[in-house]
Image (spheres, grey):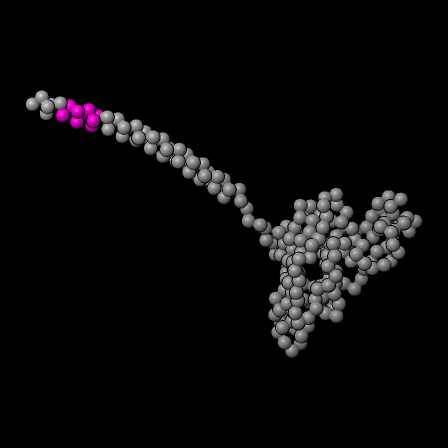
Amino acid sequence: MTDINQQLGNLIASADALTEVVAGQVGKINDTLAKQEQRISAKEAQVDNFISSAQPEKRIVTDITIGGSSDYLYPVWFTFPQNGGKLKVWRSYNWNSDTKPLNPLSAHQCGLFAEIEGCSTPWSGNPPFMHFKRFDENYNQVFSHPSFKMNCFNEKLDPDLPLYGGGTDGLIGPYCYRASGFYLRGGGIKYQLISNWNIDVKYSDKHETTLIDEGVVSEASGSYE
């Protein structure tokens, strides 16, 4: 009887020891789970913050129609934003198929895709550039003379001052420090400009002189228009 009592006591003692071990492990497991929950909560908070702060890139579509004659290409000018911008100039091949200004016997008028990136203006203190990334057109040529300095007629504003930037008064070339641009064919042709900023695009389809910019820099540097 004594042996049985002793064995029973040993068994109870072993069970108590095992219970203490299990209780200790449960505490460690709970601590580990709590730490994992904290990490998961922190990651979830990071994801929530990213989603709330993330904004899709702007996509602003501007439709323009260049009038005038289909025999001429007309100036289109704008300025890139100070922190850089992306611009696509696009038209589907069958736009204007109702009036057929380019191909009178076909709906295939002209397809155009031009992709440009740039920053600021040539006269800016910020790093200025224009990068002509991609270009293609078919059926008819409607796009010409892309330039960071807009191609224009350059002359003195003040005849008593030198021409700003040097050169000969009255020449046509990439002289405009205030605007970038290109030329698009006229004839009532539709184009689409897709930008990631609020582009202020200007154009002229008139057969007359159109002022892009003018100014007097200084008596030493000269004037321009």
Is 68 on the left-hand or right-hand side of 221? left
Looking at the image, the residue that sits furthest to the bottom is 105
Q: Position of residue 159 (x, y in %)?
A: 91, 51
Q: Is residue 151 above or below residue 126?
A: below
Query: For the point 66% across and 72% down, which residue is it?
Result: 139
Q: Main secondary structure of the magenta part?
A: helix
Question: Where are the magenta residues, as a range?
Answer: 7-16
- The residue positioned 61% from the left and 70% from the top of the image is 94
Q: Is residue 165 left or right of residue 69?
A: right
Q: Nearer the viewer, residue 209 or 121?
A: 121
Residues 55 and 132: in front is 132
Q: Residue furthest right?
A: 160
Q: Most extreme residue toward the front, as rendered?
A: 3
**Residue 11 at what x, y percent from top left?**
17, 27
Q: Is residue 219 above or below residue 141?
A: above
Quick check: 75 left or right of 167?
A: left
* Image vertical order of residue 96 relative to residue 220, above or below: below
Residue ID at (9%, 21%): 2
How many numbered discs sit on the rendered protein?
Answer: 0
Q: Does the rendering let one see residue 196?
A: yes
**Residue 216 falls inside the magenta stretch:** no
Q: Position of residue 102 (x, y in %)?
A: 68, 72
Q: Determine the image quadrant of residue 87.
A: bottom right
**Which part of the image, by quadrant, shows the N terminus?**
top left
Residue 109: name its quadrant.
Answer: bottom right
User: Is residue 191 in view?
Assistant: no
Vertically, is 13 above or below 32?
above
Magenta stretch holds residue 13: yes
> Residue 130: x percent and y percent?
71, 53
Q: Quick one: 126 or 71, which is closer to the camera?
A: 126
Q: Residue at x 85, y 49 (%)?
A: 164
Q: Residue furthest top?
A: 2
